[in-house]
Image (cartoon, helix red, strand yellow):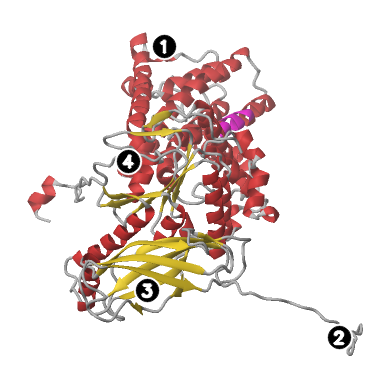
């Protein structure tokens, strides 16, 4: 630093720079709605959530809310490691707006929900991280708020915990609570949210149905990866971008049908999955290929189909034509929530165009394991080798 | 679970603030955090809570040894050891509260950045849990007074007036320091230094009426807002014949200076805290 610069700025600190994180945002969330907020890192999601949670104050504009709001920006953030579960639950409950007495009364319920009944006297610092998360989540579900703000909660914990989260979100939603969920997972958005908001550089990019938002999210993310300065654009990346920006065909609609041919996204366990998709060809091309994959809410791909040719000749895939695809899949899925992402590509090895995402719910009792197989267990007595006590 | 059919009114969210969030909740939070802070401070120690009482007494022992036995000071002051320990206990509250409160907001960073609650709870809980310590120490001090044969007087009951003024002043200062520290960590260094200066510039080790103090220095020390508090505590608790602050500085005008400074500190504390509280989460 020059002497002159040193004199002007004696402490040598870089002067603070003004950064407008959010601009021109305006949206409503209806009471009882399950609303998603998505966007890539740095798009302003967390700032928006913190404004809603009264952690930050907006420089301009107004936010209004009906009823009591409980923010869960991080599970168990208020926990003091030196305290026991009881003390922490009471402190956390009061933070979230319960009275002290109410928080104490609910402790039993909370600890039972968290499955930590044997560990109530233990200091929280001796809890495993999973136990802490469970306790935090249990508090969250018992604070009786009208609006819940949830940030990436589903990203922590194992598959079983995520499944439980899903059930609880559903239950709270049924009770008429308003749920606002910030997430990176499009599977989660599609499985749970009724509407969603895509933030891009602090502005609303898209607001509306979760599938539309998810499609935009993928497109925006891909574009951002390509626009990064200095990044050499590999051939394959360029083809991925052009496949999405300038697709050979678009899937205009996709849905599941039941045995009567009616649209239905809830299936019984073991009931065959019947997928239908409406495709509009944008550019005549030698061959179009349809493909879909089923994912669980934690983002795992459970099943990916073959790429199926939709007609080999130019005529079959002439621009402007509409095609309807029907796919039928054996259903070995355990009960739970899934998404089916469908896409069309120009060739079997080519990058896929914009995806259309369908939600699927398999009804039934919770299931252990990754697939649900038909099975029978029978018992016969074997008298030839009697059991002898030793 | 209650039904959600009742109509709810839309009300604006103004973001975090120093005081907002309901009196009941603020009080609940304040009480819970203060009590747990107080409890936690001694949970992992062998002697537990007795440290809280032991600390000022041990400190007193050393200082008394040096000042009275080595330097031979205090002989002419009535009940000097009693005065010394009372002063030390009171100053310890001031020192502990302000230096803990200074870092209180930044040490609770995860909570401040992730949760919504009236920010005032943070410095207030520091002050409250230190006040609990102060009271328990004073009980020890007064028990000692009775044991060594200081005659109980009705004016002992007036001490809470001094304590109240002390707590208000200390709390306001703590509020000021807690948000100032978030803006600039230099405040931390400066305050450590200033506390050391204040320890000697407050009539703790000596009363203000001793002849050895030149008048010019006496008027400076008398301007310290803590001085009249300690002098008044001395009159009410130790020595009814000790001169009042007005007598010491020779007039009401002089006595008004520390009062004025106290008022300025209180107003500045509330003002700055109220102004900065909505933004501390971003500034951390």
Q: Residues within 10 Å of mark 3 (few under 14, many from 20)?
A: some
Chain assignment, label 2? A
| Callout 4–callout 2 Cβ contact below 8 Å | no
Span highlighted in magenta in the image: B132-139
Q: Which residue is mark 3?
A: A291
Give the foreground label among 3 and 1: 3
Is residue B229 highlighted in magenta? no
Magenta stretch contains residue B134: yes
Q: Position of residue B205 (x, y in %)?
A: 47, 30
> Disc number at residue B218?
none
- Which residue is drawn at the image coordinates 40% and 24% (left, top)? B212
**Residue A27: assigned label:** 4
Disc 1 secondary structure class: helix
User: Residue at (25%, 81%) from the top-left corner?
Assistant: A313
Q: Is residue B175 visible?
A: yes
Residue where numbered disc 2 is placed: A382
Closer to the observer: label 2 or label 3? Answer: 3
For marks 4 and 1, give the CA distance.
Answer: 68 Å
- Report which quarter residue A301 is drawn in: bottom left
Closer to the camera in the image, B88 or B67: B88
How far is disc 3 from disc 1 in space, using C-alphas?
95 Å
Tell me if A121 is positioned left or right of A19 in this view.
right
Q: Earlier in the sequence, mark 4 or mark 3?
A: 4
Q: Residues within 10 Å of mark 2 (few under 14, many from 20)?
A: few
Viewer-nearest residue: B4 or A246: A246
Q: Which residue is mark 1?
A: B247
Alpha carbons under labels 4 and 3: distance apart: 35 Å
For the residues labelled 4 and 2, the Cα–Cα distance comes to 70 Å
Q: Are marks 4 and 1 on the same chain?
A: no
């Amino acid at each position: 630093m020059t002497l002159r610069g040193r004199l002007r700025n004696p402490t040598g600190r870089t002067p603070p720079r003004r950064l407008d994180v959010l601009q021109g945002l305006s949206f409503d969330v209806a009471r009882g709605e399950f609303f998603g907020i998505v966007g890539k890192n740095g798009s302003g999601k967390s700032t928006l959530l913190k404004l809603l949670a009264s952690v930050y104050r907006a420089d301009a504009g107004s936010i209004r809310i009906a009823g009591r709001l409980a923010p869960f920006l991080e599970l168990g953030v208020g926990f003091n490691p030196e305290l026991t579960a009881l003390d922490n639950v009471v402190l956390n409950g009061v933070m979230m707006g319960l009275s002290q007495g109410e928080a104490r009364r609910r402790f039993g319920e909370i600890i039972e929900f968290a499955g930590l009944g044997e560990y109530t006297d233990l200091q929280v610092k001796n809890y495993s991280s999973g136990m802490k998360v469970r306790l935090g989540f249990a508090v969250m579900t018992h604070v009786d708020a009208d609006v819940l703000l949830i940030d990436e909660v589903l990203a922590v914990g194992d598959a079983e915990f995520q499944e439980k989260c899903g059930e609880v979100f559903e239950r709270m939603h049924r009770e008429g609570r308003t749920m606002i969920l910030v997430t990176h997972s499009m599977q989660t958005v599609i499985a749970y949210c009724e509407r969603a908001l895509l933030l891009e550089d602090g502005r609303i990019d898209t607001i509306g149905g979760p599938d539309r938002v998810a499609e935009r999210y993928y497109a925006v993310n891909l574009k951002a990866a390509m626009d990064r300065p200095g990044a050499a654009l590999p051939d394959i990346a360029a083809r991925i971008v052009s496949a999405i920006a300038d697709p050979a065909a678009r899937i205009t609609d996709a849905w599941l049908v039941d045995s009567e041919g009616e649209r239905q996204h809830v299936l019984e366990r073991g009931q065959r999955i019947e997928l239908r998709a409406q495709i509009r060809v944008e550019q005549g091309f030698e061959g179009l290929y349809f493909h879909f994959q089923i994912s669980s809410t934690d983002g795992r791909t459970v099943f990916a189909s073959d790429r199926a040719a939709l007609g080999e000749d130019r005529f079959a895939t002439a621009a402007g034509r509409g095609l309807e695809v029907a796919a039928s899949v054996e259903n070995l899925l355990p009960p739970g929530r899934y998404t089916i992402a469908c896409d069309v590509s120009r060739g079997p090895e080519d990058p896929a165009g914009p995806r259309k995402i369908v939600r699927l719910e398999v009804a039934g009792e919770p299931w252990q394991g990754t697939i649900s197989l038909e099975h029978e267990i029978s018992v016969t007595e074997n008298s030839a080798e009697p059991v002898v006590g030793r | 679970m209650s039904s959600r059919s009742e109509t709810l009114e839309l009300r604006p969210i103004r973001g975090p603030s120093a005081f907002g969030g309901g009196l009941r909740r603020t009080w609940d939070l304040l009480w819970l955090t203060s009590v747990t802070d107080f409890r936690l401070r001694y949970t992992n120690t062998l002697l537990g809570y007795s440290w809280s009482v032991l600390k000022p007494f041990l400190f007193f022992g050393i200082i008394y040894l040096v000042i009275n036995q080595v330097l031979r000071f205090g002989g002419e002051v009535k009940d000097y050891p009693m005065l010394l320990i009372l002063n030390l206990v009171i100053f310890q509250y001031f020192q502990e509260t302000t230096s803990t409160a200074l870092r209180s907001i930044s040490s609770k960073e995860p909570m401040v950045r992730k949760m919504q609650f009236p920010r005032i709870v943070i410095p207030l809980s520091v002050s409250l849990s230190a006040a609990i310590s102060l009271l328990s120490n004073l009980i020890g001090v007064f028990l000692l007074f009775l044991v060594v044969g200081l005659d109980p007087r009705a004016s002992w009951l007036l001490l809470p007036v001094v304590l109240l003024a002390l707590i208000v002043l200390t709390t306001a200062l703590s509020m000021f320091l807690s948000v100032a520290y978030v803006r600039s960590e230099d405040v931390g260094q400066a305050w450590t230094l200033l506390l050391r200066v204040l320890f000697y510039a407050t009539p703790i080790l000596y009363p203000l009426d001793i002849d050895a103090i030149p008048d010019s220095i006496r008027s400076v020390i008398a301007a310290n807002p803590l001085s009249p508090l300690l002098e008044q505590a001395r009159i009410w608790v130790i020595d009814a014949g000790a001169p009042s602050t007005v007598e010491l500085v020779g007039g009401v005008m002089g006595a008004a200076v520390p009062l004025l400074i106290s008022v300025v500190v209180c107003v500045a504390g509330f003002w700055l805290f109220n102004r900065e509280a909505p933004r501390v989460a971003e500034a951390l």
